[in-house]
Image (cartoon, grey):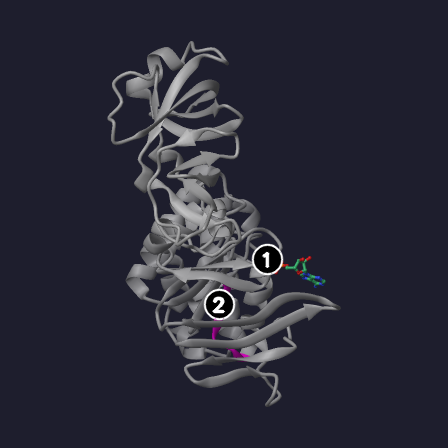
Amino acid sequence: MTAKIEISGLTKQYGTNVVVDELDLEIESGEFLVLLGPSGCGKTTTLRCLAGLETPEKGSITFNGESMFDAGGRVNVPPNKRSIGMVFQSYALWPNMTVRKNIAYPLKARKMKEALAGGRVEEAAAMVDCGHLLDRFPAQLSGGQQQRIAVARGMAARPDLMLFDEPLSNLDALLRDQVRTEIHRLHAELGFGAVFVTHDHSEAFALGDRLAIMKSGKIEQLATPQDVFDQPVSEYVADFIGMSNRLELHRSGLEWITAAGTELPLKFDTKGADAVAARLWPDDITLHSRSADVSDREVVLNATLESAEFGGRHYDVQVAAGPETYRLRASSAVHGEWLRTATVGEPVAISFRSESLTIYPLDKALVAA
Ligand SMILES: Nc1ncnc2c1ncn2[C@@H]1O[C@H](COP(=O)(O)OP(=O)(O)O)[C@@H](O)[C@H]1O
Ligand SMILES: [Mg+2]
């Protein structure tokens, strides 16, 4: 139930709109690969090309070395002959079929009579803890149950590759976490290969063996979640995964000044660049109710409070330091008492370590960390 997938030079366009652009990607056997990117960057189209639901203009796709699509060699294996299971955002169960018939459908379509007779449907339902729902109709199920059944249906035929297109987006927060954990557990148990599409970076971090971050039909970064987190290759990636603080810095003698004219005692190697963009995680900024008692290993800025939103154990805080805005997370245990009644404009201080900054040249690619 797994295969190595190779995608090479894949191009799909609608009219003159190039949606997938010379995409190269190898998915290892049993790997859980997440395609992450904003709406419209070509994730669904890439998935549909893998499934055989779209005909690309250029490129090739192989499963375990066997050609599924080859624009040059005119190979195009139809969807029902590719060993694939799909789960969509809208659960897409057949409303007039019972759960049993829904799960059996891919087995019937592939004429897998032995699997049907051998209890495969029941086994697939049990896998997602829905063995007791086999005789119900989709309308009699909750959203979470429907999506679990859709997962069982996708896996019933034990396909080489599972394709998930934002399967958690329609679920409310609690169910989203439950079904996400379930998919994670199933992958750990069964070891199927998967391409999972999402625009949610926390979902991507939680599930992916590797992440492929897409931008305009191309892959901007392909790496493990840890590597993407530690070293986003570009500001596009940094921004997308929530490294939301951005400072434009210009060299001024030995110091750096922000676009707003604040001097910062920062030390980093920019290989000669005189203007850079620096990115900083909200978690790497510390809030102080006043500028006192801050370690001198940190950069300290005086600021004013713009907003503080309660998040349970933390507050999401926004402050202004001159014309620059910083977002940070403050512990409720440390700051809750005064933040609860703090007013907009209240003087505060923030601090961060110079080493926490990730530096990008103003024209994209990473220079130094
Ligand atoms: N059938 C279609 N006809 C024309 N344009 C399409 C079609 N499907 C998708 N597109 C366009 O292709 C781009 C990528 O779409 P899609 O792959 O659905 O992105 P994503 O899943 O990343 O949001 C979008 O600009 C979309 O409008
Ligand atoms: Mg999509």
Specify the amino acid type for callout 2: Gly
Task: Give the vertical position of 297 relative to 96 (above or below).
Answer: above
Residue under pointer 1: 41
Q: Residue at x 35, y 15 (%)?
A: 289
Q: Is residue 53 magenta?
A: no
Q: Is residue 260 above or below residue 336?
A: below
Q: Answer whether residue 235 is visible to the viewer in this image.
A: yes
* Residue 129 shows in the view: no
Q: Nearer the viewer, residue 145 or 337?
A: 337
Q: Position of residue 181 (x, y in %)?
A: 35, 49
Residue at 36% across, 63% down? 123
Crowding near pointer 2: few (<14 within 10 Å), some, many (20+)? Answer: many
Q: Residue at x 39, y 50 (%)?
A: 270
The disc placed on residue 139 is none
Residues rendered magenta in the picture: 81-86
Image quarter for ligand 1 equals bottom right
Q: In the rendered image, which quarter is residue 351 located in? A: top left
SS class, disc 1? loop
Q: Name, please, the residue furthest toward the front.
A: 253
Residue 329 coordinates in the image, percent (x, y): 38, 29
Residue linked to disc 2: 85
Marked residue nearer the N-terminal end (2 or 1): 1
